[in-house]
């Protein structure tokens, strides 16, 4: 990228299962498209790659045996296999909206009791989001029930939440409480955070996760 050229923004929406990430990332992409912005949605895990298919099997089939460390490394590898593509798209001016990323990776594994720093290590060096929006479900009860996948159990989600909270003071991190909010109210709050970023040209180099 030429140093004076604008690049796309890397915008991440994080949260527990059933917090509305998929709805909000989809709507955000549609809004940006309506405004004539180049934008692409990337969801992690990306279940379509060979590594992603293994991850999918692990998530849907609870009898699928994998050590916690191996599962963690697969999720990270799934991000690394798209890292170069993400960087190139940003440099070509495309905004990228991420549905989950490194923070999910760390929070879900650390919630099993693995060392937090160990969980972080394999993601160090990945492109770091310019904006992180955490959809904060204060009370798990208020949402429609969980699905059937591994991890979709209230007691485990609470442990994951505790791990996510360790990131609340991270740079570029914002939380939006989603309990008792309509989709449109949350969408509005997301847009208020995203707008300033996409409204001006981003020329700073892509930061790396550390
Ligand atoms: N998950 C997701 C992880 O455990 N580690 C990761 O790195 C990522 C990206 O996968 N319960 C978990 C969180 C979810 C599950 O994600 C599937 P989704 O967004 O429900 O498809
Ligand atoms: Mg899910």
Image (cartoon, helix red, strand yellow):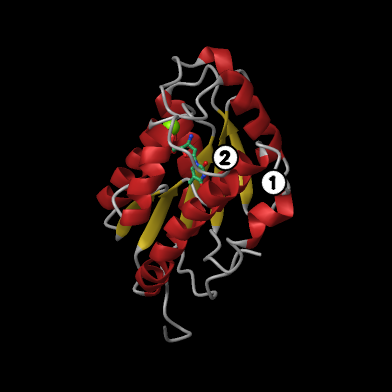
The single residue placed furthest to the bottom in the displayed view is 2
Tell me how far mark 1 sits from mark 2, CA to CA: 10 Å
Residue under pointer 2 = 134
Q: Which residue is found at the position 66% from the left and 36% from the top?
A: 111
Q: The C terminus appears in which quarter of the rendering?
A: bottom right
Q: Which residue is found at the position 73% from the left and 43% from the top?
A: 166
The relative height of residue 58 versus residue 78 in the rendered view (above or below) is above
Which corner quadrant of the image does residue 40 belong to? bottom left
Which numbered mark, 1 or 2, is in the foreground of this view?
A: 1
Q: Which residue is found at the position 59% from the left and 27% from the top?
A: 157
Residue under pointer 1 = 167
Q: Which residue is found at the position 39% from the left and 31% from the top?
A: 61
N-terminal-most mark, 1 or 2: 2
Q: Nearer the viewer, residue 27 or 105?
A: 105
Q: Circles 1 and 2: CB distance less than 8 Å? A: yes
Q: Does residue 116 appear to the left or right of 141 in the view shown?
A: right
Question: Residue 102: x and y, percent?
Answer: 55, 52
Q: Nearer the viewer, residue 38 or 142?
A: 142
The relative height of residue 89 versus residue 120 in the rendered view (above or below) is below
Q: Does residue 46 appear to the left or right of 172 in the view shown?
A: left
Ligand 2 located in image quadrant = top left
Question: Residue 128: x and y, percent?
Answer: 56, 62
Q: Residues within 10 Å of mark 1 (few under 14, many from 20)?
A: some
Question: Residue 139: x and y, percent?
Answer: 61, 18
Question: Residue 13: x and y, percent?
Answer: 49, 44
Instruction: Name the element at disc 2.
Output: strand
Q: Is residue 171 visible?
A: no
Q: Is residue 100 visible?
A: yes
């Amino acid at each position: 990228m030429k140093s004076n050229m604008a690049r796309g923004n890397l915008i991440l929406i994080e949260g527990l299962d059933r917090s509305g990430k998929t709805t909000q990332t989809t709507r955000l992409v549609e809004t940006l498209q309506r405004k004539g912005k180049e934008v692409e949605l990337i969801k992690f895990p990306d279940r379509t790659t060979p590594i992603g298919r293994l991850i999918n099997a692990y998530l849907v089939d609870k009898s699928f045996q994998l050590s916690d460390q191996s599962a963690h490394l697969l999720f990270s590898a799934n991000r690394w296999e798209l890292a170069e593509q993400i960087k190139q798209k940003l440099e070509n001016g495309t905004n990228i909206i991420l549905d989950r990323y490194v923070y999910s990776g760390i929070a879900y594994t650390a919630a099993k009791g693995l060392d937090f720093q160990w969980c972080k290590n394999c993601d160090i060096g990945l492109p770091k989001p310019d904006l992180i929006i955490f959809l904060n479900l204060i009370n798990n009860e208020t949402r429609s029930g969980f699905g059937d996948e591994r991890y979709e159990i209230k007691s485990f989600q609470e442990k994951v939440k505790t791990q996510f909270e360790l990131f609340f003071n991270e740079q570029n991190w914002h939380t939006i409480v989603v309990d008792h909010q309509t989709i449109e109210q949350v969408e509005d709050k997301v847009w208020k955070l995203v707008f300033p970023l996409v409204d001006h040209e981003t020329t700073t180099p892509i930061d790396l996760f550390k």
